[in-house]
Image (cartoon, rainbow, N blue to C red):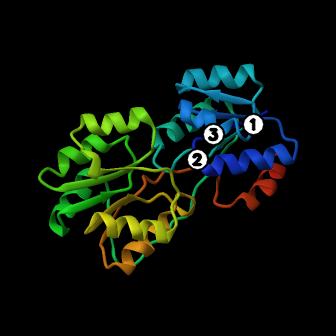
Amino acid sequence: MIFVLGGTSDSLLISDWLTETKQPFILSVATDYGETLAKQHTENVFCGRLSKEEMCTKWHSENVQLVIDATHPFATIVSETAMEACKETEIPYIRFERTSEQTDNTYLVADIEEACKVATELGQRIFLTTGSKNLSEFVAGLRNLHIIARILPVSDVIRSAEELGLVADQIIGMKGPFTKEANRTQLEMTGADVLITKESGKQGGFQEKLTAAAELEIPVIVIRRKQLNYPIEINHLTELPEILTQLEVY
């Protein structure tokens, strides 16, 4: 049994491939929304957040022989927990890590605090494509600036943004990834003069954001992902068959 830590489009592609190659697997997601998407690809879905101990117990009961971590690049706590659990249970761990690209108009920063400081120096209308999880930190760090937040069109997510004080013209409720043209249109319509994003990689529409902003000469602040020391890391689905063969799983 293969245990896929999901929550990204990458994990869905991996699930489709495992289904096609008749590999038994469980796709794990953390939210109800993630579960809804996951069940469009497989019925064998586990929904919930697991501690290290719970991972070990779950993997033992399901006879898991391999863990594939395809969580979001910024879900580093989950990845660190999974690596610890794999080490303890002696189960092989594979990290599927998105590759990233950048252009000349980018400002690389380490965290949200630094992103807010740089944004304050660059403009007044800040277009956020960082999701809703850390929105409160941006609202606190970007005081007196006009925030436009692009978030999922889900009722509780929209409600949380409103509770932070954002009003209708500061909220774009849409699900990505977005094309370059869509990004450009939204940046133009909102009059944004700074874009803040995360180093999410190709599948997260990262390059499309950078290209759209570059065409409009809008600076982009990129929050770098935390670098982890993965035991095995792959960047493309085509690498998976060889790795599974080496691990005697495929």
> Disc 3 residue type?
Leu
Q: Secondary structure at mark 1?
A: loop
Is residue 160 toward the left or the right of residue 12 in the image? left
> Disc 2 marks which amino acid?
Thr
Specify few, some or many for label 1: CA neighbours under 10 Å numbering under 14, 14-19, or 20 or more.
Answer: some
Q: Is residue 90 above or below residue 71?
A: above
- Picture coordinates of residue 11, whole percent (x, y): 65, 46
Mark number displayed over residue 80:
none
Is the Cβ of the residue at disc 1 closer than 8 Å to that at disc 2?
no
Who comes first in sequence, dot 3 or dot 2?
Answer: 2
**SS of the residue under disc 2:** loop
* Residue that numbered label 1 is attached to: 42
Left/right placement of residue 123 relative to residue 151 reads left
Distance Cα–Cα, label 3 vs label 2: 10 Å
Q: Nearer the viewer, residue 124 or 70?
A: 124
For the view shown, which residue lies furthest in the left direction? 144
